[in-house]
Image (cartoon, helix red, strand yellow):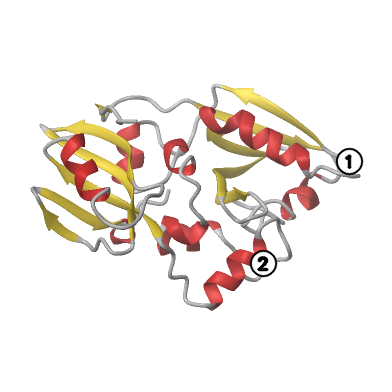
Amino acid sequence: MTVSPVPDTEAIAWSALVVSGPDAESFLSGQLTQDVTDLDRPRWSLVLQPDSTVVAPVWVTRRGDDLALVLERALAETTLARLKRFRLRVACSLEVVESVEGPYATVGERVGARWPGAPEAARGLTPHGLGRRVLEATVSFTKGCYTGQELVGRLDARGARVPWRLVFARGPSVGAIEAVLAGRGPEGPRGVTTALERAGTVEALGVAHRTLGAGTEGGVTVVEVDEVDGTP
């Protein structure tokens, strides 16, 4: 399916999954990749499937005695269902709150920061496929167990050479960028995920096979997402 570019000023709709109750912190410690114990400031984390594929990037904050996972609205119901699946014998509740403020106001801010959102999560990448900068901002390798941890830790110990990775690209059109991203490697999650129009140029996040390196091809420039510091 071809991705249509949006204006860089298009607003992102955010929701929050509010986790309440005496076991809220311990429950989330077993479900999130980041350490959220004694949370003194917002932190990025990931919710993973047991096979370590990314369900959603979440911005974890405190709301009084509760913890809130702020995430793009398109990911809220899927993430809620995933968390409920593992909510066993714990004293906590989960509630979706709509229309909250998120870490990025617009699609342009998120793409400019090279940060994954709902379209990128839909491609079934593992945390290492999001780039080292995102990995280090979202994953703790010193905390206790969490769902998907064994595979993430094993991959990191082996050098984390994943077949598919998130990239940033700039070119004359979505079609031109798609052709470059889809031109290398086997069939898979490759291709443009988010595209925006900025100053007469299309900027995009997308998934590429590891055989496609950074550089310029057919008027399209591909850049590793690790090349900017865009974490809020």
Residue 62: x and y in percent read: 66, 42
| Residue 231 shows in the view | yes
Q: Residue at x 40, y 57 (%)?
A: 164
Chain-order first, disc 2 or disc 1: 1
Considering every residue shown, the one lying at the far right of the view is: 89
Residue 66: x and y in percent read: 74, 38
Q: Residue at x 60, y 70 (%)?
A: 153
Residue 140: x and y in percent read: 60, 64
Vertical relation: 144 (above or below) 127: below
Residue type at the position of mark 2: Glu
Q: Is residue 223 left or right of residue 164?
A: left
Reading the image, the residue beneath label 2 is 150
Dot 2: element: helix
Residue type at the position of mark 1: Ala
Dot 1: element: loop
- Badge 2, how many Cα within 10 Å: few under 14, some, many 20+? few
Viewer-nearest residue: 48 or 96: 48
Q: Quadrant of residue 224?
A: bottom left
Residue 22: x and y in percent read: 86, 43
Q: Residue at x 42, y 28 (%)?
A: 12
Vertical relation: 196 (above or below) 191: above
| Residue 63 shows in the view | no
Q: Residue at x 26, y 56 (%)?
A: 184
Viewer-nearest residue: 29 or 147: 147
Viewer-nearest residue: 128 or 1: 1
Considering every residue shown, the one lying at the far front of the view is: 186
Quarter in which the N terminus is drawn? top left
Asked if the residue at tag 1 contacts the one at tag 2, i.e. Cβ–Cβ closer than 8 Å, the answer is no
Q: Is residue 229 left or right of residue 137?
A: left
Viewer-nearest residue: 107 or 83: 83
Reading the image, the residue beneath label 1 is 91
